[in-house]
Structures are given as structure tokens and as C-alpha cells.
Amino acid sequence: MNTGLPGIDEVSVMLSTVRSLQKTFPIPLQIDSGNPAVLEKAIRYYNGKPLINSVNGKEQVMRDIFPIVRKYGGVVIGLTLDENGIPSTAEGRLAIARKIVETAALCGIERKNIIIDALTLTISSQQKEAMEAVRALQLIKDELQVKTILGVSNISFGLPRRELINAAFLASALSNGLDACIINPLSSQIMAVYYAYRALAGFDENCLEYIEKYMHSETDDSATNAVIPVSKPVIRPSDRENACGNADLRAIIINGMKGQAREAAGLLLETKTPLEIIDEYIVPALDEVGKDFEEGRKFLPSSS
């Protein structure tokens, strides 16, 4: 729960929200605010042990938040980012997680009260770095022995059929040490991965949860198995090949081929002016991409 809106008394609203929710629901709350005073007020009046979201590797943030966690208790989420942003590698995120855990220990906070978020990046804009979060999970578990968490759905932002990507990512993360996941519990695909993993990992004793959930399911693909390669994609002829062959800048832009755009534009500059290239190639290509996006035929990468 986060009550941070412009123009309000966030401390007062947070306190009333905590009280109202605890009167209604018997489950724990995750309290989220970028204002330490708001967090302290909420935790002081919270009944039980809250999940505090969050701290990160920035020195000032740790100095502000850890004394509050120590004073009132609770479990704190540590984000693997610092003054330099989010590291692109798993090793970089491990280094920040190590700093968070060591600083927390100096403040008297035990490892059992720390959950590290290795931070999920979207594959639509940061494909090479996105899976580093999964690799970081195992490194963090092996070295620091703390719990881990990820916002699973961030992985698929900007893509169609997001639940397919989310489910595959969740399965990979769980297999590499993920302890808690921020997911959509109303997604049948996500929950299928959840129940299947619990059965496979032995958390679901005798697979009783899984059996109860799916014993009456009408879908069974066990008789239609096939060997499908994962590591190498199937190469098919496409507009991308045509675009590479004839240096058509318009097709290159439409297909998102950043690597070929500079070369194609350079060739066109031998016979056309920059304005002609913009009018004849770039603008028509952007118009077509925009139309396809509006009609759901194209999905544009995004970083948030």
C-alpha cells in the first residue's frame, strides 16, 4: 500500500489507511513510501510485523530507513540499485545486495528480516540484461542466504500476450531461488506455474494442492509431446531479409533493424538530400508503424 499523492497529508492518509485495512483484512500489509516519516508513523501503529518497501544501496536511503526498521521491527525489501542506477550484470546486483546486508547488520537487522529484490527489467527494451535478474537470484542466495523477491510482470512490458512471457520468467526465477513473487493471482497461466513448481520442488507434499486444483481439468497435452529446441531459433524468410538485401530504409525502420539503419541512410545520402530521405522514407515508415501499433499489429519496446 502506497498513499503518496501530490497535495495530501501523506502521514495522515497512510495512518488512516493502515487502520482501515487492518480492521477489514487479517493478512499482513506491505507498507510503501519514499518518505521515512510516513514509514515510521505507519509502522508505529501497525499491528504485527509489516513488510517495509523499501531500501536500496544508496547510503542516504540506508541511513534513513534502517534505524526505523530496527526500532519498530519488520521485514525490509532491499532493491539492488544505488547512486549509479541498476547494474547490468548479476555480479553488480550481488555487490549492492552485499552492501545492503552488511549495512543492515551494523544497524542490528538480521538477515532473516531482509528480502532482496534483484529488479526485473523488461525484455522489450533491455533483452540482454533482463535475465541477469534470474542469475543474480542464485548468486544472492548462495552468498548471502537471504530471501529474494521479484516483480514478475515487469519482464513483459510492451509485448503482446504478456502472461506467456511472465509465466516462463516465473518458472525460471523459481528454479533459481526466488522466494516471493509479485504476480497476478487471477492469471491462470501464472498460477499454473506456481502450483506446478510447488509440486516439483516438494513444497506441495504428495502433490495434494496440485491434484486438488487440476484433477478436474479438461486439458491434458501429455499425449502430444515433441522435442522442441530452445537455444536456437528457427530461421524463416521474412521482410527482415528483404530489407537487408536491398537497403530499403523504410522496411528497415518498420522492422526495427537498428543495426542496418545507419548504413542504409548513408547509401541513400549519395543520391538524395536529408530532407528527401525524411519525406520519402522515415516519415512514411513511422506512419505505418504508428498505424500498426494502434491496430495491435505491432508492440513498441518501452523501459517502464
Image: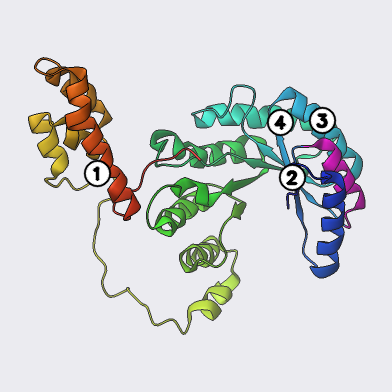
36 inside magenta stretch: yes
The local crowd at label 2, few if under 14, some if 14 to 19, many if 20 or more residues have their Cα within 10 Å, is some
For marks 4 and 3 on the same chain, the one whose residue lies earlier in the sequence = 3
Q: CA distance from mark 2 to mark 3?
A: 18 Å
Tags 1 and 4 in contact by the CB under 8 Å rule? Answer: no
Q: CA distance from mark 1 to mark 4?
A: 48 Å
Region of the chain picked out in magenta, as a range: 35-47
Quarter assignment of residue 65: top right
Residue that appears at 59% across and 31% down? 94
- Residue named by callout 2: 4
Q: CA distance from mark 2 to mark 4?
A: 25 Å
- Residue named by callout 1: 288
Q: What secondary structure is marked by label 4?
A: helix
Tags 2 and 4 in contact by the CB under 8 Å rule? Answer: no
Q: Amino acid at mark 4?
A: Ile
Q: From what the image shows, is residue 177 above or below residue 140? A: below
- Residue named by callout 3: 64
147 inside magenta stretch: no
| Side of 12 where 117 appears, left or right | left
Given this view, does label 3 or label 1 mark the residue nearer the observer?
1
Residue that appears at 49% across and 28% down? 88
Q: Position of residue 100 (x, y in %)?
A: 71, 31
Q: CA distance from mark 2 to mark 1?
A: 39 Å
Q: CA distance from mark 4 to mark 3?
A: 13 Å
Q: What secondary structure is marked by label 1?
A: helix
| Side of 110 where 266 appears, left or right | left
Q: Position of residue 182 (x, y in %)?
A: 60, 54
| Side of 3 where 48 appears, left or right | right
